[in-house]
Image (tube, rainbow, N blue to C red):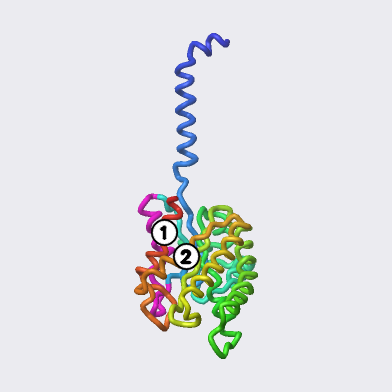
Amino acid sequence: MFKKIWKYRKPLILFLTLSSVFFIYKTAGDDRIRYVALGDSLAAGQNPYGEINYGYVDYVANYLNKNHLLKEFIKDFTMSGARTKDIINDINGGKTKRINQKEINLKYALREANLVTVSIGANDFLEQLTSQGYNSAPSLEDLKDLVDTVFIDIEQTLSLIRQFAKGQVIVVGYYNPFPNQYLKNAKEIDTLFAYIKDKYQQVCAKYKIDYVDIYECIKKDASYLPNPFDIHPNAKGYEAIANEIIRFLES
């Protein structure tokens, strides 16, 4: 019996090799990305004049699509003004959206996703800042205390997202939305955002989540924030943010 098998060893090896290649192709050939975007107006793509338009998540999705890597893109769970508690409530409450003629549950969308990007916490911080009712500009230490308070909820949110999202999760960091307010000292501003970055990196490492910093990319070009009465970037600003994420994905 062994001699008969040995006689046909070459065609057998060829058959097994081709079968292996076919199996790899079938299992990996459609290993495209299901991309889910979560978060606030920055994730939704709100422009400096209050309109929801083409944001950084759209640029990232377009990049994946052009490279034939995108299977599905869902940004329907983003919401202008969203805070950490909104995402927590949406996940725990089983929020659904009608997408492509189907009712999609957020928990299901996260489970199916290969890639999730998250922008959250800025509205929590602004809410805390407003509620304190400062009579004068808050000090650097005051602002760090607010950051510490907000990060309790940010950690809870990221922990919950990670429970359902088993693919890659990327948190998109902060930029300075008020370059002409509050802290006037550029060094203090840099110190505050370095503190926020450090807090984010600690939390992300804990839950095996990636972090992309966008502070410097927005800081270097004032034209990205053309409306002094609004915190949102223009299309070029969103493209700059997307490029930071794309560089991270490519690396």
Residue 193 visible in the current orientation: yes
Q: Position of residue 214 (x, y in %)?
A: 45, 65
- Please give the name of the residue rendered at 40% of the width and 63% of the height, measured from the top-left corner: 58
- Please give the name of the residue rendered at 57% of the width and 61% of the height, measured from the top-left corner: 201
Question: Which amino acid does the dot numbered 2 rest on?
Answer: Lys
Taking depth in this image into account, of 204 and 55 the one nearest to the observer is 204
Q: Position of residue 90 (x, y in %)?
A: 59, 69
Helix or strand or loop: what does disc 2 sit on? loop
In the image, taking residue 240 as reference, residue 210 lies left or right, namely: right
In the image, taking residue 144 as reference, residue 173 lies left or right, namely: left
Question: Which amino acid does the dot numbered 1 rest on?
Answer: Ala
Which residue is the extreme one toward the top?
3
The image shows residue 219, relative to residue 68, as above or below, that is below
Q: Residue 184: within the magenta?
A: no
Q: Characterize the local packing of mark 2: few (<14), some (14-19) or many (20 or more) Cα atoms within 10 angstroms.
A: some
Q: Quadrant of the N terminus?
A: top right
Mark 1 or mark 2: which comes first in sequence? 1
- Which residue corresponds to mark 2? 75
Residue 81, numbered label: none
In the image, taking residue 182 as reference, residue 240 lies left or right, namely: left
- Which residue corresponds to mark 1? 61
Residue 77 visible in the current orientation: no
Taking depth in this image into account, of 104 and 61 the one nearest to the observer is 61
- Residue 209 appears in which quarter of the rendering? bottom right
- Please give the name of the residue rendered at 42% of the width and 55% of the height, measured from the top-left corner: 247
Q: Do the residues labelled 1 and 2 touch (CB within 8 Å)?
A: yes
- Please give the name of the residue rendered at 53% of the width and 13% of the height, measured from the top-left corner: 5
Q: Residue 47: within the magenta?
A: yes
Q: Give the range drawn in magenta.
A: 46-68
User: How far apart are the alpha carbons under marks 1 and 2?
Assistant: 10 Å
The image shows residue 170, relative to residue 180, as above or below, that is above
Q: Position of residue 231 (x, y in %)?
A: 44, 77
